[in-house]
Image (spheres, rainbow, N blue to C red):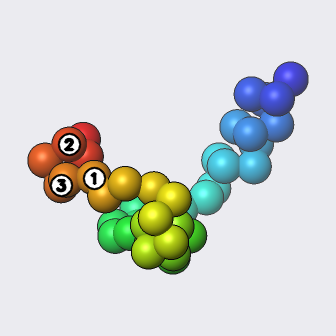
Amino acid sequence: MTAALLDRLLHHAHIVPIAGESYRLKHQRQAGMVHAVERSQIG
């Protein structure tokens, strides 16, 4: 049922790919909560 609901909602949707680091991860990294990931390890 969830798949059918998402299919109806996203049928006419436009997908916008967003590149770059999120503000949440950036601030967590600055606080030392998350370790930096090298670009070669990201997909």
- The kind of residue tagged 2 is Gln
The answer to whether marks 2 and 3 mark residues whose Cβ atoms lie closer than 8 Å is yes
C-alpha gap between disc 2 and disc 3:
5 Å
Question: Can residue 25 be seen at all in this image of the molecule?
Answer: no
> Which residue is denoted by mark 2 in the rendering?
41
C-alpha gap between disc 3 and disc 1:
6 Å
Question: Can residue 9 be seen at all in this image of the molecule?
Answer: yes
Residue at 82% in and 37% down: 5
Secondary structure category for the residue under label 3: helix
> Which residue is denoted by mark 3 in the rendering?
39
The answer to whether marks 1 and 2 mark residues whose Cβ atoms lie closer than 8 Å is yes
Q: Position of residue 3 (x, y in %)?
A: 74, 28
> Which residue is denoted by mark 1 in the rendering?
37
Instruction: Please determine whether, in this image, residue 2 is positioned above or below residue 19.
Output: above
- The kind of residue tagged 1 is Val
Residue 17 appears left or right of 6: left
Residue at 74% in and 39% down: 6
Q: Where is residue 19 in the image (x, y as percent from the top left)?
A: 34, 67
